[in-house]
């Protein structure tokens, strides 16, 4: 027995030691990649010492003696905190996921190789001036300095997936800008959906399901420069929007023999950055005549796909001519949203129609080499692409291009085989976006700002502006196509006739802008830019009008706006849509006690606010989700999930329908013996909603709180989606209850096909006080540092969820007072 006890004792000691060793090794393994933020690092390729001072939120402020060193350091700190994010975005943009992840993402890679973002980035490089090239090269040198000096301490994702990054190049930064542009330019999907709907249900039904926008516009015609009514009559064209549908072909449903190609589109256009049907962002600027301080206030919150980490990276750039703070993209130099010492700016998606499909005539159904245009046969441009696959032989695909763009049918299963379609999109032509962004960061007044944006070609975005002189303004950007009269770009058109060729782009001097408007404020929330008498067609499809309407109403009612007011408006979850829809729900006679108690919660919900603790909001939202299905799924059938996922501006159409109780849309086509009405759909949807909620959350409606049903988990890409529990627990955030929905100012969206888990919404918030820039506030949706287990990885998530902010440090004095770490980059 003594011997046994001795053996057990020794074994226990060995086991404890082994566990301690494993804990220490695990701790070392996890901490090893964390960024060094104090001390001195000697770098090759810089001219003088660079100081990187980080505040308590991990926001670095870079102080450099010259601009080369400034952007070298920006590349270095981006790589310190976000190298895996940068690498993964590069893999997506270049169509190279399969070389790391194996065969599963081959369809996604084929999609990206075909659309050709990297080829477009190479065209950008050829068009840029030397100053912009020098900046991109300095940035890439900083990224590579970090990679080369940390080969044995790369982020944990590289160890898990067992590969190392290649050197960063300026083309990689430009490709990232193209990827962002793609995710903000998805209207070609609505062309396809319209034609599929028309083929199945007829053109009238398709038009009804894609209702025209009605709501506030950003720049009313009376404040447009040199505004006169348009002789073209865009409003008349919109009234006959179905005049030219092109050739629908076999659009009744997507082919499924191209394995994975539809999911490839969903991956690129969906889960990475934006839902296909989600265009979001709010920005508003208030003139000093309507603020408590007498100087402008500018607010911006961009709505993008929510993931771990945030797409945004906060930074301060101080060196040479630059003195900018705000939000940047890891992978690109400069500040995208923010302010310098003289001006401030914000952005939202302009929702411009910049993509068209052209149906091509080819000389052969298989392996074509020519296409017809205006009676002549032209050579197809055929680009061989090789997709490397981890553990497999590479795959070769031919990319075929006409002068319109790449033919997308082989990689987008929504397109029919019998109608080869080329995608026309200005972003593929090359541009000077980086030059525009550089000049924007340097601008000191409205004229310089306006001139800088003349170079901004894609994506098309709205810019809000304010300056310390007290001015507020708005400017549209991007290449807006001029189509032939009567063509609104709503469906694919014949490409071989030449009849539908774009006729250039709207001249920058004639693009919508506004300077110190009489209203005293400017609101952009993806709403319509101009009235129909503007002489150029901008777009047909816009986001639902509710955010723009709500912001406009709140600002119009307040002539003394403060920063506190802006914070409140950022967090606003008042549902204008519920004001219209709730009466239909309360008009139902409950069929049982559970329905009665559920309706009592809705009746008590009389503030129309989608707060996390509101069960009435939950019943309303789940009822309306089922109502959509009751009304449309029987007619749309296999198209219903795609329509709900992709179409914009749907809710006003639903509200219009409910005002027509005998509309044939309410009749359930699966019950031939009965003709259902609006009342039937509303009543049955309540029964569906109550049963759905009771099954998942219990039989007490008082416990059906909206935040419980509507949570947010920041998921890591791709390890947080691996299906491997331990990896998901390491790389994903904990669930966070959220209020709001797609139509509230504080936006929090979910996929209609996977309710109600949030995957899209407010990705950052920024409030800039032009009275005192040091009063400015910001919050990111996740932390600055993306390394697993790092204290700055998730520290901003609770603040973001609660509507809290941190100060935006700007002056050297404020940065030094708030310093928590200082790293010196010194010449080697």
Image (cartoon, helix red, strand yellow):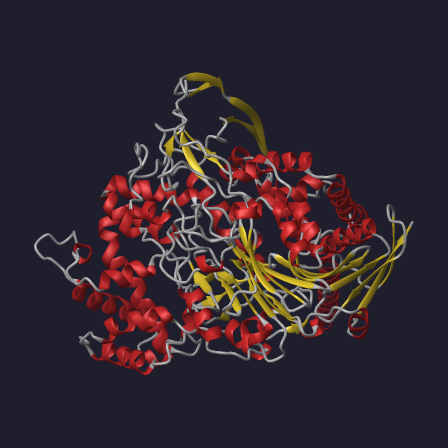
Position in image of residue 808 (x %, y %): 69, 70
Residue 658, picture quadrant: bottom left
Q: In this view of the protein, which residue sits in the foreground, 502 or 287? A: 287
Position in image of residue 782 (x %, y %): 61, 64
Q: In this view of the protein, which residue sits in the foreground, 461 or 197? A: 461
- Residue 32 in sight from this viewpoint: yes
Q: Residue, x 34% and y 81% (percent of image)?
A: 606
Question: Compared with residue 305, is residue 93 higher up or lower down, i.e. above or below?
Answer: above
Q: Residue, x 47% and y 51% (percent of image)?
A: 351
Please state, as top left, top right, bottom left or bottom right, where the N terminus lies in the image: bottom right
Q: In this view of the protein, which residue sits in the foreground, 132 or 556? A: 556
Question: Compared with residue 709, is residue 70 higher up or lower down, i.e. above or below?
Answer: above
Q: How many marks?
A: 0
Position in image of residue 593 (x %, y %): 21, 80
Residue 8, picture quadrant: bottom right
In the picture provided, is 494 more to the left or to the right than 520?
left
In the picture provided, is 675 more to the left or to the right than 251?
left
Position in image of residue 403 (x %, y %): 50, 27
Q: Residue furthest right?
A: 828
In the picture provided, is 652 more to the left or to the right than 535?
left
- Residue 694 in sight from this viewpoint: no
Q: Residue, x 32% and y 34% (percent of image)?
A: 246
Q: In this view of the protein, which residue sits in the foreground, 737 or 448? A: 448
In the picture provided, is 168 more to the left or to the right than 626?
right
Question: Compared with residue 366, is residue 586 higher up or lower down, i.e. above or below?
Answer: below
């Amino acid at each position: 027995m003594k011997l046994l006890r001795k053996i057990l004792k020794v074994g226990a000691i060995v086991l404890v030691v082994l566990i301690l060793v494993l804990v220490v090794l695990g701790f070392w393994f996890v901490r090893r990649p964390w960024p060094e933020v104090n001390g001195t690092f000697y770098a090759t390729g810089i001219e003088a010492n660079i100081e990187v001072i980080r505040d308590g939120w991990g926001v670095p402020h870079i102080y450099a003696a010259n601009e080369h060193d400034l952007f070298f350091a920006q590349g270095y700190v981006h790589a310190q905190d976000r190298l895996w994010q940068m690498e993964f975005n590069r893999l997506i943009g270049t169509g190279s996921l399969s070389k790391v992840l194996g065969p599963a993402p081959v369809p996604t890679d084929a999609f990206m190789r075909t659309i050709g973002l990297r080829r477009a980035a190479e065209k950008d490089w050829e068009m840029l001036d030397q100053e912009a090239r020098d900046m991109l090269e300095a940035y890439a040198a900083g990224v590579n300095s970090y990679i080369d000096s940390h080969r044995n301490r790369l982020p944990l994702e590289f160890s898990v997936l067992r590969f190392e990054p290649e050197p960063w190049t300026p083309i990689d930064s430009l490709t990232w800008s193209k990827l962002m542009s793609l995710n903000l330019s998805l209207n070609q999907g609505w062309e396809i959906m319209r034609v599929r709907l028309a083929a199945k249900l007829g053109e009238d039904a398709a038009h009804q399901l894609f209702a025209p926008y009605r709501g506030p516009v950003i720049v009313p015609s009376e404040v447009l420069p040199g505004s006169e009514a348009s002789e073209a009559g865009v409003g008349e064209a919109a009234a006959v929007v179905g005049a030219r549908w092109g050739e629908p072909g076999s659009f009744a449903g997507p082919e499924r023999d191209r394995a994975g190609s539809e999911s490839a589109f969903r991956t690129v256009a969906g889960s990475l950055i934006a839902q296909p049907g989600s265009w979001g962002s709010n920005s508003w600027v208030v003139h000093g005549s309507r603020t408590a301080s007498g100087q402008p206030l500018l607010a911006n919150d961009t709505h993008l796909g929510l993931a771990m980490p945030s797409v945004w990276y906060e930074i301060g750039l101080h060196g040479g001519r630059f003195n900018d703070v705000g939000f940047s993209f890891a992978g690109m130099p400069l500040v995208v949203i923010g302010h310098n010492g003289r001006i401030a700016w914000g952005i939202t998606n302009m929702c411009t129609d910049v993509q068209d499909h052209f149906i091509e005539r080819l000389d052969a159904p298989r392996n074509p080499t020519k296409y017809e245009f205006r009676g002549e046969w032209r050579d197809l441009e055929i680009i061989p692409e090789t997709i490397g696959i981890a553990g497999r032989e590479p795959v070769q695909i031919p990319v075929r291009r006409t002068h319109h763009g790449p033919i997308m049918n082989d990689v987008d299963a929504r397109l029919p085989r019998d109608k080869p379609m080329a995608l026309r999109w200005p972003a593929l032509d090359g541009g000077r976006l980086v030059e525009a962004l550089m000049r924007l960061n340097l601008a000191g007044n409205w004229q310089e700002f306006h001139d800088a944006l003349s170079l901004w070609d894609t994506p098309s975005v709205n810019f809000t502006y304010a300056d310390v002189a007290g001015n507020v303004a708005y400017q549209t950007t991007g290449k807006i196509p001029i189509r032939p009269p009567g063509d609104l770009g709503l469906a694919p058109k014949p490409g071989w006739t030449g009849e539908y060729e774009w006729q250039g782009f709207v001249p920058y001097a004639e693009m919508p802008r506004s300077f110190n408007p009489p209203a005293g404020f400017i609101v952009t929330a993806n709403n319509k830019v101009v009235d129909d008498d503007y002489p150029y067609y901008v777009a047909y499809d816009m986001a639902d009008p509710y955010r723009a309407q709500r912001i406009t109403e709140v600002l119009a009612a307040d002539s003394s706006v403060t920063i506190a007011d802006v914070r409140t408006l950022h967090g606003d979850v008042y549902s204008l849509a519920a004001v219209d829809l709730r009466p239909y729900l309360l008009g139902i006679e409950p069929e049982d006690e559970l329905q009665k108690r559920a309706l009592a919660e809705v009746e008590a919900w009389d503030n129309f606010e989608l707060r996390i603790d509101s069960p009435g909001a939950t019943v309303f939202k789940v009822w309306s989700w089922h109502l959509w299905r009751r009304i449309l799924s029987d007619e749309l059938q296999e198209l219903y999930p795609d329509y709900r996922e992709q179409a914009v501006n749907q809710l006003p159409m639903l509200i219009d329908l409910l005002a027509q109780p005998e509309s044939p849309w309410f009749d359930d086509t699966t019950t031939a013996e009965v003709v259902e009405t609006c009342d039937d759909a509303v009543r049955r949807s309540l029964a569906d909603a109550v049963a759905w909620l009771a099954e998942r959350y219990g039989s007490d409606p008082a416990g059906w709180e909206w935040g419980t049903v509507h949570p947010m988990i920041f998921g890591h890409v791709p390890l947080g989606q691996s299906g491997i529990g331990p990896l998901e627990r390491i790389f994903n955030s904990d669930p966070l209850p959220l209020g709001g929905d797609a139509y509230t100012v504080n936006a929090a969206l979910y996929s209609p096909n996977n309710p109600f888990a949030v995957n899209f919404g407010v990705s950052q918030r920024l409030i800039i006080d032009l009275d005192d820039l040091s009063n400015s506030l910001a919050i990111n949706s996740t932390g600055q540092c993306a390394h697993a287990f790092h204290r700055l990885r998730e520290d901003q998530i609770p603040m973001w969820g609660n509507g809290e902010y941190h100060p935006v440090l700007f002056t050297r004095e404020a940065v030094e007072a708030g310093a928590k770490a200082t790293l010196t980059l010194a010449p080697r």
